[in-house]
Image (cartoon, rainbow, N blue to C red):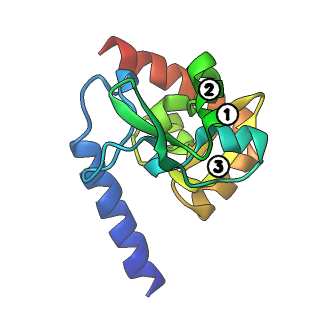
């Protein structure tokens, strides 16, 4: 059963990568079915509450072509004041995948705030791998992300 799940994950990631825009560095990851950044989670809450918190459509704004949701007016105001501080790195794509020169969706429950930046990962096993050597993966992901910006 584990082997089947692994194969399905690989197929899903490959399919996802095929549909990404050529200039992914300008994009914020959203799903095929929604224009919500970070699946509607409040990115400010990762910094202020140290946990994922679902946003509310009552507190939303458009930024970089995506709809961002927040759990409070205060968090919305904080984001408006400095969106680059709170927006996840690599447009919300999985930090480990970007380090490997691939794209995969970042999943809000698998997150890290490190050096005052928000990073998302695909799942727990990916996050465990990424966390074990995040400095190396961030360095490589930063290089790969910069290359995407030039394509």
Q: Is residue 106 visible?
A: no
Task: State the residue in front, 84 or 141.
Answer: 84
Residue 111 numbered mark, or none? 3
Q: Quadrant of the C terminus?
A: top left
Q: Which residue is mark 2?
A: 77
- At horizontal 26% and vertical 38% (from top left) the residue drawn is 20
Residue 112 percent across, percent down from the top left: 70, 45
63 or 135: nearer the viewer:
63
Q: Is residue 8 above or below residue 109?
A: below
Instruction: Give the alpha-carbon distance from disc 3 to disc 2, as whole Å.
Output: 22 Å
Disc on the earlier residue, 3 or 1: 1
Q: Residues within 10 Å of mark 3 (few under 14, many from 20)?
A: many
Cα distance in 3D space between marks 3 and 1? 22 Å
Residue 61's tag is: none
Q: Earlier in the sequence, mark 3 or mark 2?
A: 2
Dot 1, crowdedness within 10 Å: few (<14), some or many (≥20)? few
- Could you give the CA–CA distance between mark 1 and mark 2, rounded to whole angstroms? 5 Å
Q: Which residue does the image show at 34% across and 70% down from the upper left?
A: 8
Kindly tell me whether residue 52 is visible in this rendering: yes
Q: Answer left or right for 93 relative to 88.
A: left
Observer-nearest of 138 and 87: 87
Residue 127 position by quadrant? bottom right
Check residue 74 in the rendering and tell me which mark sits there, or answer none: 1
27 left or right of 53 in image? left
Percent across and percent down for residue 9 are: 39, 65
């Amino acid at each position: 059963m584990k082997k089947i799940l692994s194969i399905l994950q690989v197929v899903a990631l490959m399919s996802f990568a095929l549909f990404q825009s050529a200039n992914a560095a300008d994009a914020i990851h959203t799903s095929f079915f929604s224009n919500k950044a970070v699946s509607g989670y409040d990115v400010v809450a990762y910094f202020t509450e140290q946990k994922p918190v679902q946003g509310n459509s009552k507190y939303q704004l458009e930024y970089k072509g995506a709809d961002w949701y927040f759990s409070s007016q205060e968090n919305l105001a904080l984001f408006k004041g400095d969106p680059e501080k709170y927006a996840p790195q690599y447009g919300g794509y999985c930090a480990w995948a970007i380090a490997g020169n691939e794209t995969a969706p970042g999943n809000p429950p698998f997150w890290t705030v490190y050096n005052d930046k928000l990073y998302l990962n695909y799942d727990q096993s990916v996050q465990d791998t990424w966390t074990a050597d995040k400095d190396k993966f961030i360095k490589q992901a930063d290089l790969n992300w910069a290359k995407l910006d030039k394509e």
